[in-house]
Image (cartoon, grey):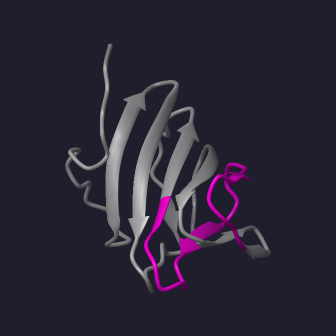
Amino acid sequence: MISRNYKTEPLKENPHKVEVRQMYNDESAQIMHITLKPGETLKPHKTPVDVVFYILEGTPTVLVGEETQVFEKDTLIESPADIVHCLSNESAADARILVTKAPRPVNKTRLL
């Protein structure tokens, strides 16, 4: 059995300059844990594979394509491949999001 806790996984450098920790990395999928502090935002970008966001904590604002909405914890949001998406935290509390990319991307994400 393999287990990981986001609190003990190393920070992963990223162009968004936010707290990202890699939880799983296999050809079939990649799972990242993102913590957005109040006021932090991921830059709008396109990912070459399907992405699923699962809100663990907080109320982040999610943009997928042309739609923007604030979501509560325990919500799953889908973002198809090659569609602009971003996450932001406009609240006063941390937001934690589990991000699953399937399959694991072989091409880089494109910042816009």
The residue sitting at the right extreme is 67
Residue 37 left/right relative to 111: left
Q: Residue at x 43, y 80 (%)?
A: 40
How many labels, in total? 0
Kindly tell me whether residue 24 is visible in this rendering: yes
Return the residue nearer the eye: 64 or 74: 74
**Magenta region includes residue 95:** yes
Return the residue nearer the eye: 107 or 96: 96
Q: Residue at x 58, y 69 (%)?
A: 86
Give percent across and percent down for residue 94: 43, 73
| 58 over 4 or under it: above or below | below
Give percent across and percent down for residue 95: 48, 68
The residue sitting at the top extreme is 1
Give percent across and percent down for residue 33: 41, 51
User: Residue 88 occupies which quadrant of the picture?
Assistant: bottom right
Give percent across and percent down for residue 27: 46, 25
On-image quarter of the C terminus: bottom right
Return the residue nearer the eye: 53 or 38: 38
On-image quarter of the N terminus: top left
Q: Residue at x 75, y 68 (%)?
A: 65
Residue 14 left/right relative to 96: left
**Magenta region includes residue 98:** no
Kindly tell me whether residue 44 is visible in this rendering: no
**Chain part drawn in magenta:** 70-96
